[in-house]
Image (cartoon, helix red, strand yellow):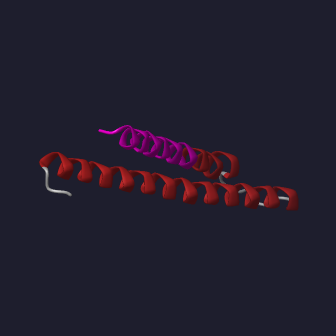
Amino acid sequence: MSRLGSAIKNILNGMIIAGVMVLVIGLYYWMIKAGIPYQDPTEELRIQYAINMGIGDALIRNGFKILILGVVCRLVMLVLNRREAKGIAR
């Protein structure tokens, strides 16, 4: 594998790890920080709950996108490397 291919592989591995980390942080905001709302919350608690849920939603959505993009690109590289090893491509 060339140096460029190795560098791309490392970048994609980093994307996968970053996606998992952002996803876990989003789940933390969603489940722990926001949690279950109080029965009769004050306006401040209602606002804080909405903020934490919004942050959690955004982090989960973005973490999932980063994770999927990294996995798909990594799989494409794996298929291309196998084809290249067999001499099919190019």
Q: Is residue 38 visible?
A: no
Above or below 43: residue 2: above
Name the image quarter holding residue 2: top left
| 85 to the left or right of 30 | left
Magenta highlight range = 1-23
Most prominent secondary structure in the magenta stretch? Answer: helix
Percent from the top left, x then y, of residue 20?
A: 49, 45
The one of 36 and 62 positioned closer to us in this rendering: 62
Looking at the rendering, in which quadrant would you find the C terminus?
bottom left
Q: Is residue 17 magenta?
A: yes
Of the 4 image quadrants, the one containing the N terminus is top left
**24 relative position to 37: left or right:** left
Q: Residue at x 66, y 54 (%)?
A: 36
**At x 54% / y 49%, what residue is drawn?**
23
On the rendered structure, is 2 left or right of 57? left
Residue 6's image quarter? top left
Residue 18 appears at what percent x and percent y?
53, 44
Residue 58 vertical placement versus 25 (above, below): below
48 falls in the magenta region? no
Residue for point 69% across, 52% down = 34
x and y percent of residue 32 in the render?
A: 64, 45
